[in-house]
Amino acid sequence: MVSTISMLLWDCDTRCYSYIVSVSKDKREWIDVIDKSGEQCSSWQHLTFPALPVSYIRVIGTQNSANSVFHLVHIELPSQSDRSSCSGHSYSDRSSVKSEISDTS
């Protein structure tokens, strides 16, 4: 069961992103758990939602204020949201969560 996700959006300038996060246990049925499509987001995103069984996560970038590319630098599932910045931290293995990147164009 997972109820938290942390994501680092590329933050080397002032650009902002919008996105939707969906989760699935079987890659057939997806549940939208976070909708930030109407917000301007940057840097670390610490997200909380009702606990669900999760095997797959899908992040759909809906907007980038600088260009048409969505830059997701790092993702943690479950979240380790006790960090105050993105430098000097080690990241633990999340091999039990499957990931897949696909071109939807």
Image (cartoon, rainbow, N blue to C red):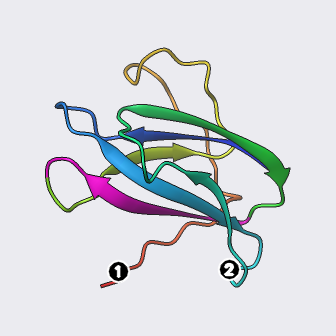
- Please tell me whether mark 2 sits on a helix, a strand or a loop: loop
Please state the horizontal and vertical placement of residue 30, each as a whole percent of the image: 68, 73
- Please tell me whether mark 1 sits on a helix, a strand or a loop: loop
Question: For residue 97, what is the image quadrant?
Answer: bottom right
Question: For residue 28, what is the image quadrant?
Answer: bottom right
Q: Nearer the viewer, residue 13 or 74?
A: 13
Residue 16 included in the magenta stretch of the image: no
Q: Residue type at mark 2?
A: Lys
Please state the horizontal and vertical placement of residue 68, each as a whole percent of the image: 19, 62
For the record, the magenta segment spans 55-66
Q: Give me the disc on residue 35.
A: none
The residue shown at (35%, 39%) is: 40
Spatial separation of the CA atoms under disc 1 and disc 2: 16 Å
Tell me if mark 2 has few (under 14), some (14-19) or many (20+) residues whose alpha carbon lies within 10 angstroms of its own.
few
Which residue, given by chain and number where applicable, does mark 2 sit on? Answer: 27
Tell me if mark 1 has few (under 14), some (14-19) or many (20+) residues whose alpha carbon lies within 10 angstroms of its own.
few
